[in-house]
Structure formats: structure tokens, C-alpha cells
Image: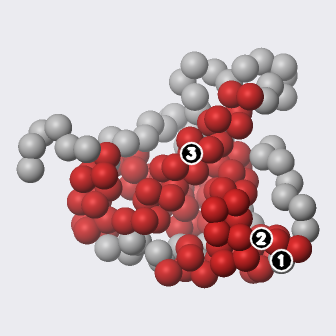
Amino acid sequence: MTTKQSVQQRIQAMAARASAYEPEAYHFVFHALDFVLEYEDRAPCQRGQPLAPDRHVSAEQLLSGLREFAIDQYGPLARLVLERWGIYRTEDFGEIVFDLVEGGLLNKQETDRKSDFSNGFSFHDAFDFAWRAPLRHIE
């Protein structure tokens, strides 16, 4: 492998090493972050300021965006798709995010922790019934 690998190659290698999640899980989280950042760029932050130049989002914002992105992409099958990739709970999203950080594909702040992703939401509630109710906007 060359020193300049594509994002795709880096994710493939990361998934092969970690083996708990399919490569699609990493791609999904990576693309969902773009979805969240795009939303955050359009919407003012709570204090009326645009998103900071470092483009950091909290675990809570990311989890909300991951949920919405999954429903947007896969509708009522979202939970089943995520589970096929090895994602069963919000803590799995945290593991993937921190794998992406370790792989140099994402940055984190000193205050970011894997535990920030603990008990974010119930997959059953978020995905099995979400298609029946309107989506909440990313908070």
C-alpha cells in the first residue's frame, strides 16, 4: 500500500483490523457526519453563531444526525441495515467514530469520550416506529 491511501482504502483496512463492523458501517458514519455538518452549516447554533471553524459536533448532535440519516437512507429498514453491519446500539457508533479518529479520518476534542455515545437512544424506538412519526430536526 502507498502512503497516500484513499479514504475508501483506509476504511477498508480499518474494518479488516477491527472486524466488529462491516466497512459499510464506517462509510455510513463518515457520510452521516457530512449530513450533520451540512445541516449545522445551514442552521444557526443555539447562541446564534455559525458552527465553529473546526466543524466539531457533539456526540448528541451526531447521534441525532445518524438516526435521521439512517431513516432518510433506509426508511423502515434502517435498523436491519445497521444491524447487518454490526451496529446494534449507540455505543457502536461511538466505537466507529473513535476508530475513525484513530485512523486519522476524523478529529476529536480533548473532552470527547466514547462514553458520550452511551444510551443515546433505543434502536427499537428510533427505527422501528420512526417511519410512522415525522422526523425530529437535529438538535
**Where is residue 88 shown, x and y percent of the image?**
58, 77
**Where is residue 139 shown, x and y percent of the image?**
81, 44
Disc 1 target residue: 129
Judged from the image, the secondary structure of the residue bearing numbered disc 2 is helix
Residue at 47 percent of width and 75 percent of height = 85
Residue 72 is at least partly visible in this image: yes
Q: Say which amino acid is labelled 2.
A: Ala
Q: Say which amino acid is labelled 1.
A: Phe
**Where is residue 72 shown, x and y percent of the image?**
70, 60
Along the line of sight, the residue nearer the viewer: 32 or 19 = 32
Residue 69 is left or right of residue 21, and the answer is right
Gap between marks 3 and 1 measured at Cα: 23 Å
Gap between marks 2 and 3 measured at Cα: 18 Å
Query: Which disc, if any, is residue 60?
Result: none
Disc 3 target residue: 33
Disc 2 target residue: 126
Q: In which quarter of the image is residue 40?
A: top right
Q: Say which amino acid is labelled 3.
A: Leu
